[in-house]
Image (tube, rainbow, N blue to C red):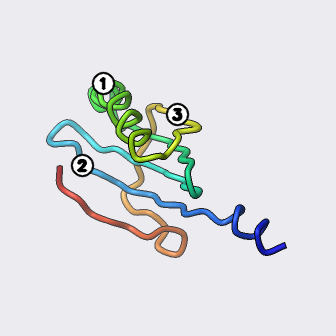
Amino acid sequence: ADQHADKSQNWQLTMKLGVGDIGELLTKAKLQPDQLALDFYASNDAVLKQLMNFLPLLKRRLVSLGIEVTKSQCQLGKIPETLDQRSYHIFKAKA
C-alpha cells in the first residue's frame, strides 16, 4: 500500500512569468517522479509564438534529465492580475 501511495505523489506548481516587454505567461506544471505535464497560457500571440519556438528545446532538455513530458498544452488565455494565495505558491522571476 505504501508503494501505491508513493506513486500517486506529485508536485503542482503555478508560475506567472513576464516575457520581456511583450506580455505574460502563466505556467501550470504537474510533476510526478519521472513525468511532467505542462499547461501554458500566453497573454497574446507574440508570447504564444515565442513559447512555441522554445517548447521543443525545453522538452529535449527535460528528456536529457530523465523527465518525460507527457502533456504540453499551449493556448491564449487571460492572465489573472493575482492568483489565489490559498491555492498557489507564487514565484517571481526575471528572464
Q: Looking at the image, which residue is at 29% across and 32% down?
A: 47
Decide: is 80 above or below 2. Answer: above
Left or right for 56, reference 2? left
Decide: is 41 above or below 32. Answer: above
Label ID, residue 92: none
Label ID, residue 53: 1
- Residue identified by numbered label 2: 18
Tell me which label, 1 or 3, sits earlier in the chain: 1
Q: Looking at the image, which residue is at 55% across and 51% down?
A: 34
Q: Secondary structure at mark 2?
A: strand
Q: Amino acid at mark 1?
A: Asn
Quadrant hosting residue 33: bottom right
How far is disc 2 from disc 3 in space, using C-alphas?
Answer: 19 Å
- Residue identified by numbered label 3: 73
Q: Position of residue 3 (x, y in %)?
A: 76, 69
Q: Secondary structure at mark 3?
A: strand
Tell me which label, 1 or 2, sits earlier in the chain: 2
Q: Amino acid at mark 2?
A: Gly
